[in-house]
């Protein structure tokens, strides 16, 4: 069995989670799968799979080899499709990772327009906090808010967002509009336990940072629920500007303490392979970038 075929077998085992499932997927006998993995481990002089009663798990060496193996197989597939003339035709599944609430507030109208223009593409979206590992997580494109590490691949800036504090007009009419972060001591707040959300609110005050820990009248498990509660006048909420874009545009929420907000954060689309990326990736980047840059949820 060739080295390339051994990598295909190994990748199938990794994805399926067992030798038997990989054998069914590849239409090979379990004995052939075992011989292939054994030959691969012998050639590399390192165990790649740890066999147990519940199937197989990757050894530390196996985890590293799986990443490299997947990358080699994907690049080979891209080269073959390009040689066959398929690289220029957007088709297949496109996986896009988004921050929570970005789908509802910003992304879906753009996605619908893209699918109308490229009907052979099947779009899959998933929520992602922070900067995802594109290759390891099987993600084609990610819309990321925040500063990127150097290893994030190619990035296309689309704008900037900022943390804001806001409240419903009825709440502000009853409780008053805070003028400084210290005024928050006399206000009600709505917090969330969602990942990435902080119980402390930070503000810029001249050259120092002012930290306020508001007393919540309600704590929600999701930011979506917390924003909705704020629109009902329950209290002030701190969120990212895009997370409450519709509520701010429609007047359900109004920003306060704008002179004390923290610094803006960049937003960008990240992806792999640059201009060598597959057609569905390249067309989405080209299609979505100007629309995102023009979207009022992003600052210029």
Image (tube, grey):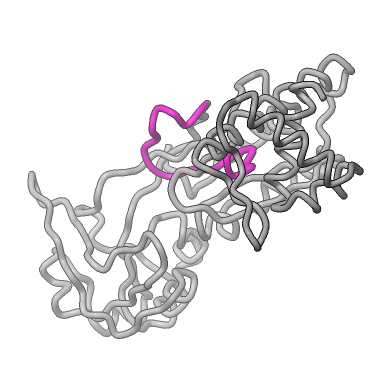
Magenta stretch: dominant secondary structure: loop
Identify which residue, 136 or 57, lies in the foreground. Answer: 57
Q: Quadrant of the N terminus?
A: top right
Q: Is residue 189 visible?
A: yes
Towards the viewer: 140 or 213:
140
Decide: is 160 above or below 178.
above
Query: As drawn, is 208 to the left or to the right of 158?
Result: left
Q: Residue furthest right?
A: 27
Q: Quadrant of residue 47?
A: top right
The residue depicted at 22 percent of the width and 77 percent of the height is: 176
The reply, left or right, for residue 4 in relation to residue 130 is right
Q: Is residue 32 above or below residue 16?
A: above
Is residue 5 rendered to the left or right of residue 271? right
Residue 260's x, y, as percent? Answer: 19, 54
Magenta segment range?
Answer: 136-153
Which residue is found at the position 84% from the left and 27% from the top? 89
């Amino acid at each position: 069995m060739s080295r390339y075929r051994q990598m295909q077998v190994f990748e199938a085992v990794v994805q399926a989670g067992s030798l038997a499932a990989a054998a069914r997927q590849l239409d090979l006998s379990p004995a052939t799968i075992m011989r292939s993995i054994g030959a691969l481990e012998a050639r590399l002089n390192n165990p790649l799979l740890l066999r147990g009663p519940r199937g197989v798990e990757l050894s530390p060496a196996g985890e590293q080899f799986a990443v490299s193996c997947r990358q080699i197989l994907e690049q080979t597939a891209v080269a073959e499709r390009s040689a066959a003339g398929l690289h220029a035709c957007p088709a297949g599944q496109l996986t896009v990772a988004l921050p929570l609430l970005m789908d509802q507030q910003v992304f879906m109208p753009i996605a619908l327009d893209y699918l109308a223009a490229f009907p052979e593409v099947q779009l899959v979206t998933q929520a992602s906090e922070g900067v995802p590992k594109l290759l390891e997580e099987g993600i084609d494109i990610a819309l990321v808010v925040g500063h990127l590490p150097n290893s994030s691949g190619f990035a296309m800036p689309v704008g900037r967002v900022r943390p804001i504090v806001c409240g419903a007009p009825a709440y502000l009419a009853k409780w008053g509009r805070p003028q400084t972060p210290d005024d928050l001591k006399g206000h009600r707040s709505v917090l969330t336990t969602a990942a990435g959300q902080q119980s402390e609110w930070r503000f810029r005050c001249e050259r120092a940072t002012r930290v306020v820990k508001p007393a919540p009248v309600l704590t929600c498990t999701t930011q979506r629920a917390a924003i909705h509660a704020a629109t009902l006048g329950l209290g002030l909420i701190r969120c990212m500007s895009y997370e409450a874009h519709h509520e701010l545009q429609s007047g359900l929420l109004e920003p306060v303490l704008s002179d004390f907000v923290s610094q803006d954060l960049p937003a960008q689309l990240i992806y792999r392979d640059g201009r060598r990326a597959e057609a569905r990736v390249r067309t989405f980047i080209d299609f979505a970038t100007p629309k995102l840059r023009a979207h009022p949820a992003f600052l210029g």
